[in-house]
Amino acid sequence: MSNDKRDDSGRFAASVDDTDILEAIDQAPGPVATAAELADILPIGRRAIRERLLDLEERDKVARKTVGARSVVWWLIRNDATGDDTPDFRSGFGALAGSDFAEQVKAVGDDLDRDFRESERELFADADDTDA
C-alpha cells in the first residue's frame, strides 16, 4: 500500500488506492467481503471504505448485495468471456471446494426419494388391499 504523501497541489494523497481495495476483496476468506472486513485489513475506516466501494461500483469494478437490515457484501466484477459477475459462492467452503460433495448430497437425496416412494407404495398398497 502506498504511503501518505502530498500530491502536486499539496493535498494528502490517499494512503490506499483502488488496487489495494480490489486486492483486499480478492484475498478475503470467502467469495464476498464486507466493509468491516476490509477495514480490518486496510489502514482506513469503514466509512471511507464504503465511499470508495460505491465509487468502484459506479466504475463497474465491484458489485454489492444487501443481505440484512444493515449488511452489505461486495465482490469483484470479473470481466471474463462469460460476462458473469456472480461470485463463486462454492469457493468459500474451503475443503469442500473442488470435491464431489454436491454429487454425494444428490446421491443421498436420490436414495431418500427412492426409499420414500417405496415406503409410500407399500403403505398405500396395504390400504388398497383393505378397501377391497
Image (spheres, rainbow, N blue to C red):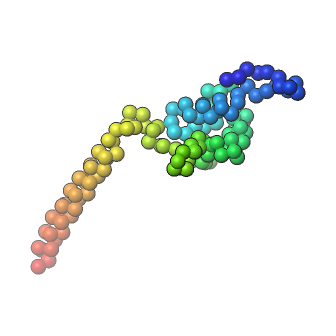
Indicate the quadrant where residue 32 lies: top right
Indicate the quadrant where residue 61 lies: top right
Q: Is residue 40 shown above or below 67?
A: above
- Which residue occupies the extreme bottom position in the image? 132
Identify the residue shown where x is 70% and y is 30%: 17
Q: Is residue 57 shown above or below 47?
A: below
Indicate the quadrant where residue 132 lies: bottom left
* Quadrant of the frame with the N terminus: top right
User: x, y percentage for residue 114?
Assistant: 22, 58
Identify the residue shown where x is 22% and y is 62%: 117
Left or right: 120 with respect to 57?
left
Q: How many marks?
A: 0
User: x, y percentage for residue 80?
Assistant: 54, 45
Report whether residue 78 is seen.
Answer: yes
User: x, y percentage for residue 52?
Assistant: 71, 37
Left or right: 110 with respect to 122?
right
Viewer-nearest residue: 130 or 4: 4
Left or right: 98 with respect to 51?
left
Report whether residue 71 is seen.
Answer: no
- Which residue occupies the extreme front position in the image? 81
Viewer-nearest residue: 5 or 105: 5
Identify the residue shown where x is 73% and y is 34%: 48
User: x, y percentage for residue 68?
Assistant: 59, 47
